Amino acid sequence: MKQELERAVASSVKDLFDIKMAIELTRPDEQFGDYATNVALQLAKQIGQNPRQIAEAIRTHLLSLQGEALQKIEVAGPGFLNLTLSDRALIMAASEQAPKSLVGKVVVAEYSDPNPFKVLHAGHLYTSVVGDAIANLLQNAGATVHRVNFGGDVGLHVGKTIWAILNDLGGEIPDKLADIPESERSEWMAKCYVAGTNAYEDDETAKIKIIELNKQIYQINNEADHDSPLAQIYWTCRQWSYDYFDAFYARIGTKFEKYYPESSVAGLGLKTVQEQLEKGVFERSDGAVVFKGEPYSLHTRVFINHEGIPTYESKDVGLIMQKWVDYHFDRSVVITGNEQKQYMAVVLKAVEQFEPKLVAATSHLTHGLVKLVGGVKMSSRKGNILRAVDVLDAAASADQELTGHGSESTVLGAVKYAFLRVRMGGDIIYDPTESVSLEGNSGPYLQYAHARARSILAKAKVEGVEIKDLQPGERSLLRKISEFPEVIQQATTDLMPHYICTYLYELAQTFNRFYENNRVIGDDREPTRLNLVGKYAMTLKNGLNLLGIVAPERM
């Protein structure tokens, strides 16, 4: 309905003033109508006429084009046009779906990106939740979405962890890995990473050995060595990490089509950088290969170190190229922490020099840190990391204290919504108690709102009938429901799931006002109002599902 009216306003402007304009209607407060536009004020500057006179002319012409769809059009203030839909048009608008604007498009959504040999921290939980919601939005718009995950199975952090593992095992003794209980494997590797990091920073002998192990692990991958004792330890522990990741993703309801280990793209990244070195994109510096970003107001980064080993930068080049080979995407969305912003800017600027279309198709979204209320900045290097499971456990504990049962769907709904309701970019201060509350702007509140609506429908003795002859409270609820496709479209365009959270909370509040003042069961208008309750419940469910949150039938 919105797009139809925008076209009608544009047509009126063209017919009256022979001017082509892109019209975007906005949603005013309900007392001023259903849509508004300041097109008359914009035209006044171009044609030198009084904006109210322009608005009156558009009003008359628009009513001739859209008389059945519009109950009234008012000229307000200096020349604003306020449009109120007819009941019939509003009922139709409340049944519309968000446009399938991405049909035929291929999108790669890369998020979460944990490193094997390290623990999943709260940031990985955040990117998993937000990435999943963004992928849902893109898929809902008709795109074919490939959800992928990238992680460092080679690199210095692996050398640090393997060094500590060898110390703990007493040498290259793969059989001793069997002594480590399955439930303790991820924590054991996390502790080894901390021990290896401390040794690297404090012990020169250990540092030399870790650097050597880093080279050996690259060699293990290059030669596909699975038989040597060191290789057996490496591959076994790497698989432990992936098993741990899979179990965690299953718990939070996230699925990935493909993992890209760094080792799988390092070769392509190295080859690409070496080829572009010959073409002048990269240059040599003190035995290393670098990209100088200063001409682009960026900074210089090393892509191949002085020992000929590809750095993270080269691996990201390889990843970009490999994703293109695998999917020939129209768009690539990458979600990382804010600390990667400048790093990725250099990587993308380097790739832009030889594959500009891939960079043009790439969106890099970033987010801040996740902290518990009263918490401090944490670091996996120091071992005081806020783990992903710590966030979920805190929510479960708070929910147990509040309700006495600690439902998994409520816990996940609480955490996901607490992350998603905040605009992506800044730090997230997570309050477990607030997140599980059944009052206020929380996931469980919206889950309960859906269950409550389903309960009302379950009590009905008659089927819902066609909605007509709207009363004020009914109209307000239907008006809010009609906003849903517009919110979805904007959230998809901007890749901002928090728009949906804001809308769903406002929708639930609108329903509460409606229900307080309009009896449903037993009223003469029960069939009509049941239809409204059904539309409301379905809208809530669809919105929660896009966020990756379960909409329960009962709570």
Image: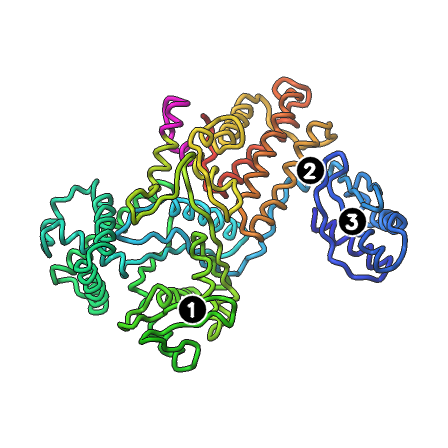
Q: Residues in magenta?
A: 397-413
Rendering coords of residue 347 (x, y %): 43, 66
Q: Locate residue 201 relative to residue 137 in the image: left or right.
A: left
- Type of residue at label 3? Asn
Whichever of callouts 3 and 1 sits on the residue coming sooner in the sequence is 3
Quadrant of the snapshot with the C terminus: top left
Q: Is residue 288 left or right of residue 188?
A: right
| Dot 2 amino acid type | Ile
Q: Label 3: few (<14), some or many (≥20) within 10 Å?
A: some
Q: Nearer the viewer, residue 396 or 475?
A: 396
Q: Residue at x 30, y 64 (%)?
A: 264
x, y percent for residue 231: 16, 60
Is label 2 in a helix, a strand or a loop?
helix
- Residue type beneath disc 1: Thr
**Picture residue at 82% right of the left edge, 42% below the top:** 73
Instruction: Give the quadrant of residue 432.
Output: top left
Name the residue beneath numbered marker 2.
91
Residue at the image point whose x is 73% and y is 57% from the top = 22
The crowd level at tag 1 (other Cα within 10 Å; few <14, some 14-19, many 20+) is few
- The CA distance from mark 3 to mark 1 is 47 Å
Q: Which residue is mark 1?
A: 300
Q: From this viewpoint, which residue is outermost toward the top?
A: 522
Nearer to us of marks 1 and 2 is 1
| Disc ID at residue 38 | 3
Depth check, mark 3 against mark 2: the one in front is: 3
Q: Earlier in the sequence, mark 1 or mark 2?
A: 2
Q: Is residue 166 left or right of residue 245?
A: left
- Few, some or many residues within 10 Å of mark 2 (<14, 14–19, 20+): many
Compare marks 3 and 2 and give the one earlier in the sequence: 3
Query: Along the line of sight, which residue is nearer the eye, 202 or 293?
Result: 202
Query: 150 or 449, which lies in front?
Result: 150
